[in-house]
């Protein structure tokens, strides 16, 4: 199985690549910045980008989508329909937050809902978990003993819920209903920071003790 993490941009966001070693088909998760550098890496590895999936609209997770799609035009762009319009709303702040303007990505080829599946190559499949709270249309991506949690759950912390469109109650319920129910050895790959596991977070994350 192909797996690679790139830390991108001023906010040090994690961009993940997962895929099928046999076919070299890959899914890109949250390409938030450094688009040209990411494209160069993908081409050097001879990866066939078949899908670009965004966990949520914040620009440190979506800012390089347009760069990826322009270089891999056959790739499917997918995210939740509630979050896609938020990219355009935040784009004017890109220069301040990220040091450069961004190109808005095209409308998604596929809007993702809870329980949807994403197929990569011949042997890789992930399931979508709808986990609103940090943003209205936040999703997580689960499969193969991994869960990509975007900005919902981190090592020792949880996502912010003080942004426009955030909701702290929804965030906690998303974690409780869709992440804490996963196997304890499920590896968490979050939008920022190091990997951890569901079991570690249930045991040590101070924000989850009351749950």
Image: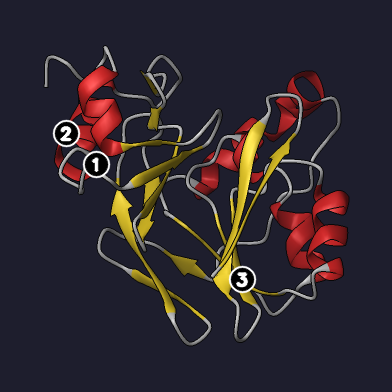
- Disc 1: CA contacts within 10 A as few (<14), some (14-19) or many (>=20): many
Q: Look at the image and tell me in which quarter the C terminus lies.
A: top left
Disc with the residue nearer the chain's start (2 vs 3):
3
Q: Are marks 2 and 3 in contact (CB under 8 Å)?
A: no
Q: Are marks 1 and 3 in contact (CB under 8 Å)?
A: no
Q: Are marks 2 and 1 in contact (CB under 8 Å)?
A: yes
Give the image location of residue 196, x and y in percent.
41, 34
- Disc 2: CA contacts within 10 A as few (<14), some (14-19) or many (>=20): some
- Is residue 148 shown left or right of residue 17? left
- Is residue 195 shown left or right of residue 101? left
Query: Which residue is denoted by mark 3 in the rendering?
Result: 26
Tell me what residue is drawn at x 53 percent, y 31 percent: 194
Q: Nearer the viewer, residue 168 or 203?
A: 203
Is label 2 in a helix, a strand or a loop? helix
Tell me what residue is drawn at x 27 percent, y 18 percent: 204
Image vertical order of residue 33 relative to residue 4, above or below: above
- The image quadrant that residue 8 belongs to is top right
Image vertical order of residue 108 relative to residue 203, above or below: below
Residue 138 in view? no
Give the image location of residue 45, x and y in percent.
80, 69
Query: Which residue is denoted by mark 2 in the rendering?
Result: 176
- Calculate the distance from the C-alpha at mark 2 to the C-alpha at mark 3: 30 Å
Query: Which residue is denoted by mark 1 in the rendering?
Result: 179
Give the image location of residue 39, x and y in percent.
82, 60
Residue 125 in view? yes
């Amino acid at each position: 199985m192909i797996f690679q993490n790139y830390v991108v941009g001023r906010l040090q966001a994690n961009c993940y690549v997962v895929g099928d070693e046999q076919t070299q088909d890959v899914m890109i998760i949250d390409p938030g910045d450094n688009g040209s550098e990411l494209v160069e890496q993908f081409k050097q590895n001879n990866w066939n980008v078949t899908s670009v999936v965004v966990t949520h609209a914040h620009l440190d997770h979506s800012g390089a989508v347009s760069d990826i799609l322009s270089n891999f035009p056959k790739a499917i762009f997918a995210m939740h329909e509630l979050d896609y319009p938020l990219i355009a709303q935040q784009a004017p702040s890109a220069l301040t937050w990220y040091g450069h303007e961004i190109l808005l990505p095209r409308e998604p080829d596929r809007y993702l809902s809870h329980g949807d599946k994403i197929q990569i190559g011949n042997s890789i499949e992930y399931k979508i978990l709808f986990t609103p709270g940090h943003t209205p249309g936040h999703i997580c991506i689960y499969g193969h003993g991994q869960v990509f949690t975007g900005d919902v759950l981190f090592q020792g912390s949880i996502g912010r819920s003080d942004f426009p469109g955030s909701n702290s109650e929804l965030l906690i319920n998303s974690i409780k209903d869709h992440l804490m129910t996963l196997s304890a050895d499920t590896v968490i790959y979050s939008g920022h920071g190091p990997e951890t596991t569901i079991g570690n977070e249930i045991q040590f994350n101070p924000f989850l003790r009351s749950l």
